Amino acid sequence: MSALLDVILPVFLVMGAGYFMTWRGVLSGEAIDGLMNFAQGVGVPCVLFLGVANLDLSQDMALAPFMAFYTGAMVCFVVGGIAARVVFGRPGPDAVAIGFVCLFSNTLLLGLPITERAYGTAALTTNYALIALHSPLMYAFGITAMEVVKTHGQGLALHSVLAKIGRGLARNPLLIAIAAGFVVNLLHIPLPGFALDAIKLVGSAGLPASLFGLGGVLVRYRPDGDLRIVAMITGLSLILHPLITWGLGTQTLGLTVPELRSATVTSAMPPGINAYMFAHMYGVGKRVAATSILVATALSVLSVWFWLQVLP
């Protein structure tokens, strides 16, 4: 119970405050959009830049946590996409979008603050390593799968698909910050103390602002679409993904305790806002994506609490 009270509830109370103040009209939708633009365009990129710049790449970029986390993510994509197509009879592009919702955990806006509150700032090393590849890998995979499905039978123009992937990734401020962090890290570029202090100051506002803003964004979503698919997505995201990660980490890959904690807690996160953005980008599966984010985020209070009790 202490984990629920001390770790999870403060995070969701910040989200709840954003939801309540937006719902009651204290903050407008435009204000929430501005807050999220700051969080995702400036504040959180500062957090990621510092985290990646300070990684010990010879130690922290271990293969085992990646295999545990991303194996679970890919299994959820395959199961969710096939079920959407075969069981629920959704068109191919819809099935890809639904699979992407199952795939894309909220590693950043929820995974980081919950892991930090549970295990301390020092425990975020594996989180940073996972996040460094999360958006570029998942978006590249999702966009490729969608373009293949959409152009099936029409003759796939590989160069146009690759160009679209490249344009999408190159404009993402989170990925720019990660890339800059790797440059500083690999080239051992020294940053002056005043610059580091400024980046830390801005970054310190990034996660609280993103949590508050996420609550405000969720006001726009209403339970809609095929609730059977929503239930499937929620189960895959909150149950199957962390179960696979934990099982591989303990039984096969031999993760250390810090690696197991970060990988499992991160995999237990609900789908992130980027899952809806992907669906919106292609204009398919938007209602299911939005409802799944809302439902899974609410239920993740219980799933995260469960894993905090199970993990060493």
Image (spheres, rainbow, N blue to C red):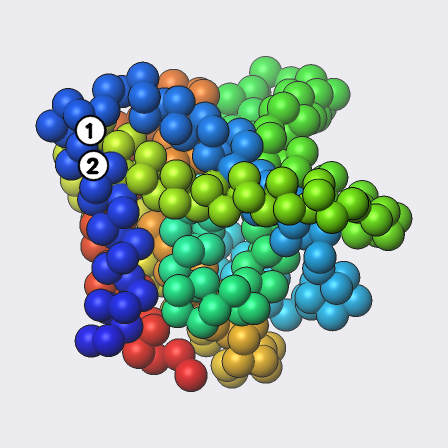
Answer left or right for 112 relative to 285: right
Q: Which mark is residue 220?
A: none
One can see residue 232 in this view: no
Quadrant of the image containing the N terminus: bottom left
Answer left or right for 196 relative to 85: right
Amino acid type of the residue tagged 1 in the rendering: Thr
Answer left or right for 136 relative to 242: right
Q: Secondary structure at mark 1?
A: helix
Q: Give the residue displayed 28% in from the left and 72% down from the top.
A: 3
* Image coordinates for residue 290, horizontal then vertical, percent: 28, 33
What residue sits right under mark 2 in the picture?
19
Amino acid type of the residue tagged 2 in the rendering: Tyr
What residue sits right under mark 1 in the picture?
22
Q: Quadrant of residue 156?
A: top right
Q: Secondary structure at mark 2?
A: helix
In this view of the protein, which residue sits in the foreground, 304 or 159?
Answer: 304
Q: Please, is residue 114 above or below residue 246 in the view? A: above
